[in-house]
């Protein structure tokens, strides 16, 4: 008797537009994990809420390797209520973060604020031309929100991935839909595209 491989689903997390691959464990009702269903998944930064975008055929599972994370469970109404409260807190943190950045005159652009599902910390994503000394800002934000604060500097391409949007072609940005890694852009490529 051979074991059936765990099916794999694409889950779109709340914090990113591009869906990631996750396995569905044996002990979970696989019929309940279908497109459109909210689920709790394990990520490198802890549990997160996402929505199943699609399922992959069982034949594709052996090709994917062992580095795939797993679906922990189907999200309950309580989980979704927690996530809605977190989204409200993220919006408030974004507003206050913008005010604090302006007060201090820091040369940085706040892109997004994300609260981890377990509530352990708030992550502030920002773009900036160079290095920024934000130690005092972190102290103020930690005192304001009584939570661990993490500041992550991202590039403009990562910002486009996070915010999504549409390209010059009229379709959703490639970096937010299907691109997994950013290849370096050479001067020759930029000249060809008149950038």
Image: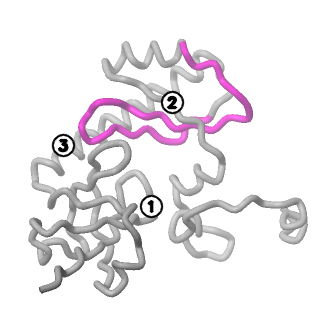
Judging depth in this view, the residue of 84 and 28 nearest the camera is 28
Label 1's element?
loop
Q: Earlier in the sequence, mark 3 or mark 2?
A: 3
Judging depth in this view, the residue of 49 and 23 nearest the camera is 23
Q: Residues within 10 Å of mark 3 (few under 14, many from 20)?
A: some
- Mark 2 — residue? 151
Cα separation, mark 3 vs mark 2, equals: 23 Å
Q: Earlier in the sequence, mark 2 or mark 1?
A: 1
Viewport quadrant of the C terminus: bottom right
Q: Which dot marks residue 82?
A: 3
User: Where is residue 122 drawn, in percent x and y?
Assistant: 38, 32
- Mark 1 — residue? 17
Q: Which residues are magenta?
A: 109-135
Q: Residues within 10 Å of mark 2 (few under 14, many from 20)?
A: some
Query: Residue drawn at (40%, 51%), measured in percent from left and top?
Result: 15
Query: Residue drawn at (26%, 55%), measured in percent from left and top?
Result: 41
Cα separation, mark 3 vs mark 1, equals: 20 Å
Q: Earlier in the sequence, mark 3 or mark 1?
A: 1
- Judged left or right of residue 7, residue 108 is right
Number of the front mark, 3 or 2: 2
Residue 42 to residue 166: above or below: above
Q: Specify whether residue 111 is painted magenta.
A: yes
Label 3's element?
helix
User: Where is residue 53 drawn, in percent x and y?
Assistant: 32, 72
Residue 146 to residue 86: above or below: above
Residue 142 to residue 108: above or below: above
């Amino acid at each position: 008797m051979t074991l059936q491989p765990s099916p794999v689903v694409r889950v779109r997390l709340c914090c990113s537009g591009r869906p990631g691959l996750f396995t569905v464990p044996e002990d979970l009702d696989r019929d309940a994990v279908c497109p459109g269903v909210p689920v709790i998944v394990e990520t490198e930064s802890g549990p997160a809420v996402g929505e199943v975008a699609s399922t992959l055929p069982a034949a594709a599972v052996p090709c994917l390797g062992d580095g795939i994370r797993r679906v922990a469970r189907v999200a309950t109404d309580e989980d979704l209520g927690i996530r809605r409260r977190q989204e409200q807190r993220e919006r408030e943190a974004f507003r206050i973060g913008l005010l604090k950045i302006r007060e201090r005159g820091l040369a940085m652009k706040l892109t997004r604020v994300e609260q981890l599902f377990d509530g352990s910390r708030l992550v502030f994503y920002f773009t900036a031309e160079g290095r920024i000394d934000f130690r005092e800002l972190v102290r103020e934000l930690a005192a304001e929100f009584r939570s661990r604060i993490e500041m992550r500097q991202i590039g403009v391409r990562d910002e486009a991935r996070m915010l999504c949007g549409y390209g010059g072609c009229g379709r959703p940005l490639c970096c937010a839909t299907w691109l997994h890694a950013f290849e370096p852009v050479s001067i020759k490529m930029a000249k060809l595209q008149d950038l």
